[in-house]
Amino acid sequence: MNNREPVISLKNVSKIFEGKRVLDDVSLDIFAAETFVIMGCSGSGKSTLLRLMTGAIKPDEGVVLIKGKDITRLGEPELDELKKAFGMTFQYSALLDSLSVEENVALPLREHTKLADEIINIIIKMKLSLVGLRGFEQYYPAQLSGGMRKRVGLARAIALDPDIVFYDEPTSGLDPVVSGIIDKLIKDLSVKLMITSVVVTHDMQSVFEIADRVAMIHKGKVIATGTLDEIKNSADPYVQQFIHGNPHGPIDFFKEDINMPQALGL
Amino acid sequence: MISDIGRSVIEYYGWIKRVISFFLDILYWTFVGPFKGKFSRRQNVVHQMSFVGLRSIAIVFFVDIFTGIVMAMQMAYQLEKMGAVIYVASLVAISLCRELSPVLTALVVAGRAGSSIAAELGTMKVTEQIEALETMAINPVRFLVVPRFLALLVMLPALTILGNLSGIFGGFIIGTTSLSINPDLYMQTTFNYLALKDIYSGLIKSVVFGMIIALISCYEGLHTKGGAEGVGKATTRSVVISFILIILTDCVLTTIFYFSQK
């Protein structure tokens, strides 16, 4: 797998927020048409990592290469051009609530292409049937359930037929059935349309379902990368604790310097 | 104590710098962007115009007509002593066109439309909608701010004209009824003393006020931090800052228009 050029490549990336190192010397390679999952606890820096890849924030150290271009050095017009080749879904779907489902999906098409309205309408119908939401064109985001909103977000993300789709917590807060539907959609898109998918999640069921390769982040560092099987069989105690959701282990939930019983006055 | 003062001075200095650069950004996307093929959607501009303008008509009408009425009554009380009640007409018209109508209309619109712009953009910011736009390579200033800016730039002067007319009408009601001035004479006195400069200086003011409202409410909205509480704070800040800036700018502009030649 490593003889191919990576589509996304992070080299020694660090990010500091208000004096705190959120990401520390992270290096990752993501290859074409694979589904790459970034997993880690809340606050481990995985969402920050995703935002670095989309160019929403710039790293303090290191470079982020997308299709061989260093996005930290691109000017706004070049970065915008590159952004049209990728889609993103958000944790809370981030649909524009003043626009209907149809208008939300049409937005990137209307803004970035000169397609006629009839063609845009056909594309909207195609994308919405891909996520199983035909017939909901005239609804507004507030009228939809969380899972439906996430699916509309997905339809919007793939409206311009991107080669890379970023997913921020695609299944968080959804019931198991809808989670399963979303997982299947992600898998289908990457297999049928050869889309490179980068998924940030801490939903282990979803990781086992969709991942080709996995990276685990803990406290801003990548502590393990590998194929799904490699991660499952990893001897790393952090990885084992995380994938089994074990409350006891090296990942400390409480700050070490706090003695809980004492702090509670027991 | 001194370090606190120092810190807030630095904070305000930084805020002013950021607002000015945001303003330049808006001007770029309003006037330069279209020549590079980056238009704001006409539909969005029309929608904002109807929100800012049409739906403020009633409140602007009532605020200004009652201001006209109150002014006519108060001035009549003073002018009666000099037997110059007829000048109520010109006094009401001039003070409305020069000062009261532009300022009151701007304050009303800042409270009504400015606050709602800040709340809307603030909610979009905290629910990642702004980030979603940026990820889709859609510039939020072009897509969200320019339509609101244009709408306020056009609609505030229009509302001010409406304010002028309703204020004069308010004065007219009092003048012709309780002060028993002949209606023809009232209108004649109004327009004899009302110079063109009185009207256009008021309209120039309202254009500037429109820019202030759009600038501040959009800036505060797009820089909202931290959930529902943040949206509330942004809304309050946008109204408070707009009010202060409107009054301050009014003072400066009045000086420029009427006291700089002396």
Image: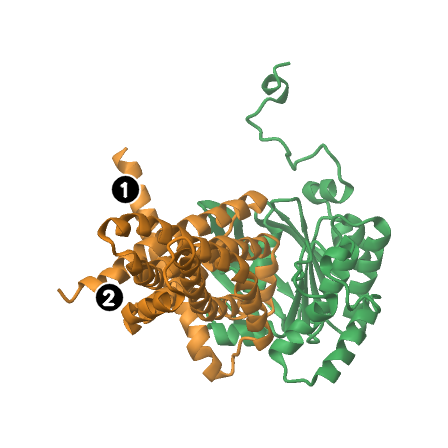
Quarter residue A134 falls in? bottom right
Quarter residue B160 falls in: bottom left
Q: Identify the residue position indicated by label 1 in the image.
A: B6
Count neighbours of disc 2 (C-alpha within 10 A) and say few if under 14, some if 14 to 19, many if 20 or more.
some
Question: Toward the viewer: A265 or A108?
Answer: A108
Residue depicted at x 51% and y 66%: B148
Q: Is residue A226 above or below residue A40?
A: below
Chain in green, by letter, is A
x then y, percent, for residue B261? 15, 67
Q: Could you tell me the amino acid type at mark 1?
A: Gly
Q: Nearer the viewer, residue B89 or B151?
A: B89
- Chain that the image shows in orange: B
The 10 Å Cα crowd at callout 1, few under 14, some 14 to 19, many 20 or more, is few
Callout 1: SS: helix
The residue under label 2 is which amino acid type? Phe
Disc 2 or disc 1, which is closer to the eye? 2
Total residue callouts: 2
- Position of residue B163 in the picture relative to residue A31 (left or right): left
Are tags 2 and 1 found on a single chain?
A: yes
Residue B250 visible within the image? yes
Identify the element where label 2 is drawn.
helix
**Drawn side of residue B259 relative to residue A226, left or right:** left
The x and y percentages for residue A71 are 51, 69
Residue A67 percent location from the top left of the image: 59, 74
Q: Residue furthest top?
A: A266
Q: Is the C terminus of chain A in the top left, top right, bottom left or bottom right quadrant?
A: top right
Residue linked to disc 2 = B257
Q: Chain of mark 2?
A: B
Q: Give coordinates of residue B49: x percent, y percent.
A: 54, 69
